[in-house]
Amino acid sequence: MSGPARPPTADRVGRVRPLVMGVLNVTPDSFSDGGRFLDPEAAIAHGLRLVAEGADLVDVGGESTRPGASPVPPDVERDRVVPVVEALAGHVRVSVDTRHREVAEAAVDAGATLINDVSASLWPVASQAGVGWVAMHMRGAPATMQIDPHYEDVVAEVADFLAGRAAEATEGGVGEVWIDPGIGFGKTLRHNLELLAGLRSLVALGHPVVVGTSRKGFLGTLLDATSPEDRLEGSLATAVWALTQGARMVRVHDVRPTAEAVRLIAEEVGSP
């Protein structure tokens, strides 16, 4: 089997084109699709489907980090994700969505080349393994993060936090550092909208920005859409907005329509 596939690095105008990260929840309780892909064979099949739909990366997670979620023992999380990472790594670049060192290390050993870190603390693992790292901003823990979150200036505070973590990682030898404002992670609807409006402040930090708004609760509020699967319009609108503001990757459940939107954006960028 060949090694892990890498995402495209440049489009025809010489820029790193926006990337689409497909969500693969190997969990019983994720907010959008919990339980659908808990079986490894179902998860692998869905991961390959995401690749066929245009995902540049598949993000495999074995612990729900939705608001109010209970923590999962690292050994349980590891057993959920490792077989899936191992099976997909020869077909697409795989990231592991985790906040636990032992899970990150096991997933990297199985072929993951990016650690999508909601705790923004695992850069030493990435440095030691020579893989990429995403630092995400989250206030508190999933079980408590939505209990009255407060900021004086959410854009400035998130930017300061991510700049500090990214600097630590870079100085610690991580060669590929991404930052993520953590939409919906310890933020109110207003905070989420302010972060989306202020994305250029994060882009200006100089690290590639990844944004995940897909199917999230604030979109349900704005669209009056109770079911996460009924939030496609909001997911696409916010993904496109993020990319036009300079984000370089979007994390999504609905890969095919998002990949088509990204292709159109890239074509527009490359127009004379």
Image: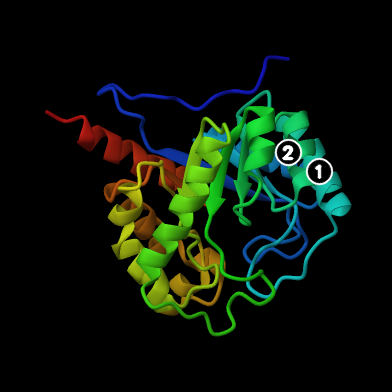
Dot 1: within a 10 Å radius of its alpha carbon, few (fewer than 14), some, or many (20 or more) residues?
some
Q: Measure the C-alpha gap from mark 2 to mark 1.
A: 6 Å
How was the colour assigned to the protein in this rendering? rainbow
- SS for callout 1: helix
> Which residue carries the number 2 mark?
44
Q: Quadrant of the N terminus?
A: top right
Instruction: Check disc 2 and give the amino acid type.
Output: Ile
Q: Is residue 249 left or right of residue 263?
A: right
- Could you say which is closer to the camera, residue 196 or residue 38? 196
In contact (CB < 8 Å): disc 2 and disc 1: yes
Identify which residue is drawn at 66% across, 40% down.
124
Which x, y percent locates residue 156?
36, 65
Q: Which residue is outermost to the top?
A: 2
Residue 248: image quadrant is top left
* Residue 145 appears in the figure: yes
Which x, y percent locates residue 27?
76, 57
Which x, y percent locates residue 97?
66, 48
Instruction: Check disc 1 and give the amino acid type.
Output: Pro
Identify which residue is drawn at 66% across, 46% down.
122
Vertical comparison of 10 with 156: above or below: above
Residue 28: image quadrant is bottom right
Vertical comparison of 7 with 242: above or below: above
- Could you say which is closer to the camera, residue 159 or residue 33? 159
> Which residue carries the number 1 mark?
40
Q: Which mark is residue 247?
A: none
